[in-house]
Image (cartoon, grey):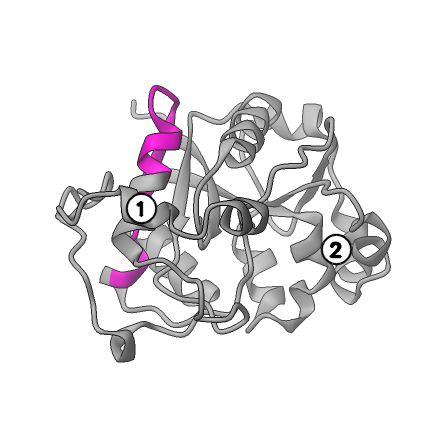
Amino acid sequence: MTFARRIGLLGGSFNPAHGGHRRISLFAREALGLDEIWWLVSPGNPLKPRAGMAPLGARVKSALQMARGAPIRVTAIERDLGTRYTIDSLRALIARYPRHRFVWLMGSDNLAQFHQWRDWRDIARALPIAVVARPGYDGPALASPAMAWLRPHRVGAAAFRNRGEWSAPSLVTLRFDPDPRSATAIRRADPDWADRFSQVPPRDQLTFRPIRPIPVQAIPVQERVQAP
């Protein structure tokens, strides 16, 4: 008998990846009893300015470097899927990996604006959501339309971890010591960080194919603002 692998999905720009991403991922893995975390490095995000956005290859390399030695896989599979919105990406991943069980990981800052995402209720119906508290965003998250809709579906982390089968919608709130690190601060202190990575295309840890540069006009539109 093959047991389903329990995978946490953390999406974002990773511009660049940093220790906060790793810490949140490992904390969520332990709290939820996950087998591993997948970092979905977004090809592009219209809710973030293109100025200052490093090439996809550099962002993936920063994620690979930060995830080294941890049960984290780094992928830009959404570029290969050609999906424009998170709901489409999730449906494609669920269809491609039917033996896996996925949980969506997001910060409380994203929960505050989750209702602005395309088909956000369908996202919540497709897989459980785990929200990691972020400093300064608890109030807006608690007052958000998405929280009002998800509140009846809240589940404690221990109960979620011990479930034999996951169901959705389910909302798990994870709290731990705030991590002050942010990609914005890193870019401000080191605007040329991406230049330190070679031009050799990195290899995707899910598709195992090289991640080659793509024209700007070919970048799919995605609505989320994940790992900052």
Foreground mark, 1 or 2, reads 1
User: Viewer-proximal residue, 54 or 164?
Assistant: 54
Kindly identify the residue that appears in the image at 68 percent across and 69 percent down: 115
Q: Residues within 10 Å of mark 1 (few under 14, many from 20)?
A: many
Does the magenta run of residues contain 70? Answer: yes
Disc 1 residue type?
Val
Disc 2 residue type?
Leu
User: Viewer-proximal residue, 182 or 205?
Assistant: 182
What is the secondary structure assignment of the residue under circle 2?
Answer: helix
- Pinpoint residue 6: horizontal percent, then vertical percent: 44, 32
Above or below — where is 221 with respect to 213? Answer: below
Above or below — where is 216 with respect to 181? Answer: below
Range of residues picked out in magenta? 63-79
Does the magenta run of residues contain 68? Answer: yes
Residue 90 horizontal side relative to residue 114, left or right = left
- Circle number at residue 68: none
What is the secondary structure assignment of the residue under circle 1?
Answer: helix
- Pinpoint residue 201: horizontal percent, then vertical percent: 15, 48
Kindly identify the residue that appears in the image at 25 percent across and 76 percent down: 218
- Circle number at residue 60: 1
Residue 48 horizontal side relative to residue 51, left or right = right
Q: Which numbered disc, 1 or 2, marks the residue that appears first in the sequence? A: 1
Using the rendered view, name the quadrant where residue 118 is placed. bottom right
Kindly identify the residue that appears in the image at 62 percent across and 24 percent down: 31
* Residue 166 showing in the rendered view: yes
Residue 114 horizontal side relative to residue 141, left or right = left
- Circle number at residue 150: 2
User: Viewer-proximal residue, 91 or 207?
Assistant: 207
Above or below — where is 213 with respect to 34? Answer: below
Q: Residue extending furthest bottom?
A: 217
